[in-house]
Amino acid sequence: MDWVVFTYSLPAKLRSSPRVTLWRRLRRLGAVSLVGGVQVLPAQDECIEAFQWLAQEVRQSKGEALVMRVEQLGGMDDQQVIDLFQQARKEEYEELNSQAAELEKTIGMKKKREDAMSMQGALARLRKRYAEIARVDYFDCPEGSSVAARLARVEQALSPNPSVAPKVAPAMLAEYKDKKWVTRPRPHVDRLACAWLIRRFINLKAVIRYAMQPEPAEVAFDMEGAEFGHQGNLCTFETMRIAFKINDPAVSAIAEIVHEVDLRDGRYTRPEIAGIDAVLKGWLLAGLTDMELESQGIALFDGLYSALASVLPGAKKRRK
């Protein structure tokens, strides 16, 4: 496989701050260091671009920098280089897992509301750190799955309204391939996510109408009397995901984001929630039409899916 390497030197008289900043940037990128201080990343577009930006910053500081794409690294085969990335991510995941384990131990020991809020905040910070590591986990380090599982257990234990998940009746994908769909006008997060799910996993060219009343043979979602709607503590997107057995981890992560933006019950603390919420509110304030909202929503959830699929172990890199 191809690799991108980055070498640099900074003036000896340069103060330490730019050196420390550069070191931190390289760490956040997940780069590994070889003999001689050569920094390496897999030759992915975003990695090449990141090294090019760093090289530009080094030159602006009167230093020298070189970015190269290579097929082999100084007598090391691909697996040896991959092992370096795996070891680096393993150490980061293990540190995070230790912190999550400490938080898990405290659950049940503290009863005050402020203690619960403090633990929610701690969980949010751990989730953010997990997302940072997973983003640069280029080769799916096995320890990542165990950390994700522990964070999920902690999140479930901290849920302010734990309840038994409602039973969702299964739906056969083939029976909905040619259906027409309808939901309420002025679609917001849940309905936009459902429209994305329909177009990306059920029927790319599906007809989706926005009205207060369904017509005969239309499949209604997220409206009164709809075939697919909220069930228990599940939003409509979660209901549809379960009904159609869409078990892609990236879709599951989107379901958590949609749930929290829609229901605001504190059940999930994913770092993307605030940003998605702000964008959707902005669209409503801008007075976009239903079709404009849908078009923008499809693009938004396409981008969100691609970003999540690139870092979540087991996620499909391409949609159906």
Image (cartoon, grey):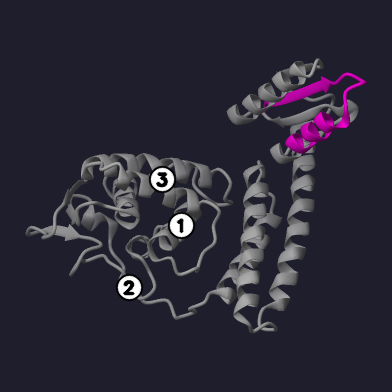
Secondary structure at badge 2 equals loop
Residue at 36% x, 49% y is: 281
Decide whether residue 4 is among the magenta residues. yes
Label 2 sits on residue: 231
Q: In x, y percent, where is residue 315?
A: 52, 50
Q: Is residue 66 visible?
A: no
Give, as a single range, the part of the protein colored magenta.
Answer: 1-26
C-alpha gap between disc 3 and disc 2 = 26 Å
Q: In x, y percent, where is residue 256?
A: 46, 60
| Residue sitting nearer the eye, 299 or 4 | 299
Secondary structure at badge 3 equals helix
Of the residues under marks 3 and 1, which one precedes in the sequence? 1
Query: Which disc is residue 191 wearing?
Result: none
**Residue 18 located left or right of residue 287:** right
Q: Which mark lies nearer to you, 3 or 1?
A: 3
Q: Which mark lies nearer to you, 3 or 2?
A: 3
What quarter of the picture does the N terminus occupy? top right
Q: Which mark lies nearer to you, 2 or 1?
A: 1
Residue at 75% x, 64% y is: 99
Mark 3 vs 1: CB contact within 8 A: no
Type of amino acid under label 3:
Val
Type of amino acid under label 1:
Ile
Indicate the quadrant where residue 243 lies: bottom left
Query: Which disc is residue 257 wearing?
Result: 1
The relative height of residue 190 versus residue 311 in the rendered view (above or below) is below
Residue at 42% x, 76% y is: 165
The relative height of residue 275 versus residue 95 in the rendered view (above or below) is above
Query: Which disc is residue 279 wearing?
Result: 3
**Residue 159 located left or right of residue 211:** right
Q: How crowded is mark 2: few (under 14 residues within 10 Å), some or many (20 or more)?
A: some
Q: Residue furthest right?
A: 12
Q: In x, y percent, where is residue 317?
A: 50, 42
